[in-house]
Amino acid sequence: MQINKPPEHTARVLPAWMRLLAILAGCLSGLSGFLVFGIAFLFVPLVLILGAIIQPYVPRLGRWVCSVGAVIVSAYAGIFLVPQAFGSIWALRYWHTPHDFGVLFLFVFSVGLVVWTDVVLVMNRRMGKTTNEIRRRVSGGVADL
């Protein structure tokens, strides 16, 4: 029985700023959905938030839950929040109050954070694969990188 796993088989913990970004994106998208569509939309981004919270303690499961949550929140933002943001922009021509600007800012900011979270998670995933491939090549005796 082997106690120490080889480095390519250990799951990496996401950096704290990435987990915080995922939590912030989930909270803001849930809040903006709640303000327009009701209380049920508070629970949609909970998978992303839960994945970001448990990831340091259970790295593989946390990364998987975070990835599934990112897909769910991206679909949620694309289906519900982006059209609402465009509708808010369109309505600003006819009627605008400070409340309308605040809601529009919340929509745009939450969609931007969701997109940023997705990009960061995908880039981190790709960088992890390339790091593992480099480790295998070096340990296998192939020195041409």
Image: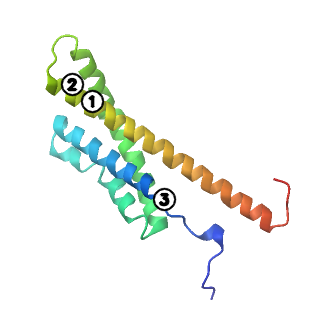
Coloration of the structure image: rainbow
Residue at image coords 22%, 47%: 42
Residue tagged by mark 3? Answer: 14
How many marks the image carries: the answer is 3
Q: Are marks 2 and 3 in contact (CB under 8 Å)?
A: no
Residue tagged by mark 2? Answer: 101
**Relative to the observer, which residue lies in front, 98 or 43?**
98
Residue tagged by mark 1? Answer: 105
Q: Position of residue 120 (x, y in %)?
A: 50, 46
Residue at image coords 16%, 17%: 96
Q: Position of residue 137 (x, y in %)?
A: 78, 61
Q: Are marks 1 and 3 in contact (CB under 8 Å)?
A: no
Q: Is residue 140 left or right of residue 30?
A: right
Say what amino acid the circle numbered 2 marks.
Phe
Say what amino acid the circle numbered 1 marks.
Phe
Rounded to the nearest angstrom, the CA distance separating label 2 from label 3 is 34 Å
Is the residue 83 above or below the residue 138 in the image? above
- In what element is the residue under mark 3? loop
Residue at image coords 85%, 59%: 143
Q: Is residue 123 left or right of residue 90?
A: right
Say what amino acid the circle numbered 3 marks.
Leu
- In what element is the residue under mark 1? helix
Q: Are marks 2 and 1 in contact (CB under 8 Å)?
A: yes
Looking at this rendering, what residue extends furthest in the bottom direction? 1
Rounded to the nearest angstrom, the CA distance separating label 1 from label 3 is 28 Å
- The quarter holding residue 89 reads top left
Residue 77 - label: none
Residue at image coords 23%, 39%: 33
Q: How would you rate the neighbour count of disc 2 (Cα within 10 Å): few for under 14, some for 14-19, many for 20 or more? A: some
